Image (tube, rainbow, N blue to C red):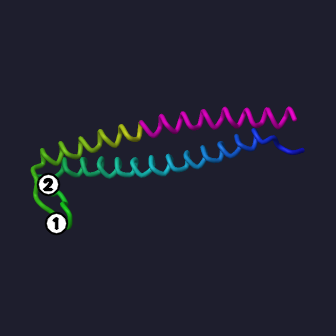
Amino acid sequence: MPITKEAEEQIQELQLLEQNLQNFAMQKQSFQLQLMEIEAALKELEKVEKGYKIIGTIMVEESKEDLLKDLTSKKEIIELRVKSFEKQETKLREKASKIQNEVLEKIKSE
């Protein structure tokens, strides 16, 4: 039993959505890893008197307060990005699920 052209197009769209979901998952994972590194750096910074920052290929001393402010800011930005990825991922999953159900209904009715 052949599949209709419309069903084929929806299957291709579904495959594209799955690829996008995989890309989102990889990017989200990268940001989550950065978030873990920042959180670890913040914990370590609480234990020390002096702080250092790597700029290019050198390490320079920087005030603990400035480092805390910088790391906290980066953490907030990354948390927002992760939330954004999660929202986009949810929307893509919902769309993929809808298309998948439509395709299954078309195939069943044929």
Distance from Cα at disc 2 to Cα at disc 1: 14 Å
> Contact, CB < 8 Å: mark 2 with mark 1?
no
What residue range appears in magenta? 84-110
- Please indicate whether residue 23 sits to the left or right of residue 31 in the image: right
What mark, if any, has residue 82 been given in the picture? Answer: none
Q: Is residue 31 magenta?
A: no
Q: Is residue 97 magenta?
A: yes
**Residue positioned most to the right:** 1
Name the residue: 16% across, 66% down.
Answer: 58
Residue 13, image x, y percentages:
65, 43
Mark 1 residue type: Ile
Q: Residues within 10 Å of mark 1 (few under 14, many from 20)?
A: few
Name the image quarter holding residue 57: bottom left
Query: Please, what secondary structure does the residue beneath circle 2 have?
Result: strand
Closer to the camera, 47 or 65?
A: 65
Residue annotated with mark 1: 58
Closer to the camera, 66 or 43?
A: 66
Q: Residues within 10 Å of mark 2 (few under 14, many from 20)?
A: some
Residue annotated with mark 2: 51
Name the image quarter holding residue 96: top right
Residue 27, image x, y percentages:
45, 49
Name the residue: 18% across, 60% down.
Answer: 55
Q: Is residue 47 above or below residue 10?
A: below
